């Protein structure tokens, strides 16, 4: 089954304790992206990647890191989490050129709470 | 940059009522336009799209028409069901992979 898989789905952590949210897609998509969803603010893009070893900042990259060493994986790293990073996080991917850009496939989300 | 203004919710309707969720955008060039839906506890999924002016996207009884002259892409459904309860996001694309999402409109349909 074609899907985007995120882990963990739920996490409660404490300020300053490094964590990684993994994202994996099995559709051979070149484009991948991370968003955070907050009440009243909608979805905001954190980072995106057009292909392996190519990453770029989105609208709210501060406090986050990403890497794209393989096409299928795009982990989101919080080196020193703070309470304002408490949010619902979504990973998404999109097929390569030839399809309609903008057709994103989303994971089920990772709810992160930083105490 | 691109921006999108979406009707604020929440919207509460009775089953079989008519639904309209307004969406207007500002964009350079001629973007593709998308509506995404988020059911409770799930990620977003594409509901419908339109890639050029006057195109009508449709899916699951929902429709939206790309109106270049009014820069709008309003979502409509003639008869909503309880299962349509979700959050709906309007999202123009600048022609690349970058989408600008609206803030979302929560729809609740009551029996």
Image (spheres, rainbow, N blue to C red):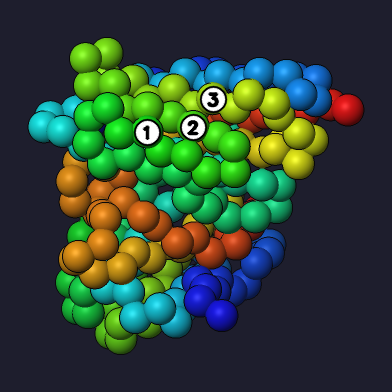
Question: Residue A18: x and y, percent?
Answer: 50, 71
Q: Report the residue at 31% width, 44% height from top.
A: B99
How far apart marks 3 and 1 lie (CA) works out to: 11 Å
Q: CA distance from mark 1 to mark 2?
A: 7 Å
Are the residues at dot 2 and dot 3 in contact (C-beta closer than 8 Å)? yes
Q: Say above or below: A1 vs A35.
A: below
Which residue appears at 58% of the width and 55% of the height? B43
| Residue on which the image places disc 1 | B56
Q: Residues within 10 Å of mark 2 (few under 14, many from 20)?
A: many
Is B16 displayed left or right of A19 in the figure?
right
C-beta proximity under 8 Å, tags 1 and 2: yes
Q: Work out whether residue B91 can be spotted.
A: no
Query: Label 1: few (<14), some or many (≥20) within 10 Å?
Result: some
Q: Is residue B72 above or below residue A111?
A: above
- In this picture, residue B73 sits left or right of residue A36: left
SS label for mark 2: strand
Residue at the spot of label 3: B76
Q: Is residue A89 above or below residue B81?
A: below
Disc assigned to residue B63: 2
Marks 1 and 2 share the same chain: yes
Kindly tell me whether residue B96 is visible in this rendering: yes
Q: Residue furthest right?
A: B111
CA–CA distance in space, label 2 to label 3: 5 Å
Label 1 secondary element: strand
Q: Is residue B100 left or right of residue A92?
A: left
**Mark 2 — on which chain does it sit?**
B
Subunit ID for the residue under disc 3: B
Q: Are marks 2 and 3 on the same chain?
A: yes
């Amino acid at each position: 089954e074609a899907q985007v898989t995120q882990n963990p789905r739920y996490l409660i952590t404490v300020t300053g304790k490094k964590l990684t949210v993994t994202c994996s897609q099995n559709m051979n998509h070149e484009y991948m992206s991370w968003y955070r969803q907050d009440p009243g603010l909608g979805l905001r893009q954190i980072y995106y990647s057009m292909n392996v070893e190519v990453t770029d900042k989105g609208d709210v990259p501060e406090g986050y890191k990403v890497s794209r060493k393989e096409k299928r994986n795009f982990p989101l790293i919080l080196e020193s989490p703070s309470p304002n990073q408490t949010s619902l996080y979504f990973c998404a991917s999109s097929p390569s050129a030839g399809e309609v850009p903008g057709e994103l496939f989303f994971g089920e989300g990772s709810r992160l709470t930083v105490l | 940059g691109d921006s999108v203004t979406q009707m604020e919710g929440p919207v509460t309707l009775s089953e079989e009522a008519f639904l309209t969720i307004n969406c207007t955008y500002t964009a350079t060039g001629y973007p593709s336009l998308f509506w995404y839906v988020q059911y409770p506890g799930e990620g977003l999924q594409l509901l419908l799209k339109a890639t050029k002016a006057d195109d009508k996207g449709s899916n699951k009884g929902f429709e939206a028409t790309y109106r270049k002259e009014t820069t709008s892409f309003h979502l409509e459904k003639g008869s909503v069901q309880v299962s349509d309860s979700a959050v709906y996001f309007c999202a123009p694309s600048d022609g690349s992979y970058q989408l600008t999402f609206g803030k979302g409109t929560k729809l609740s349909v009551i029996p």
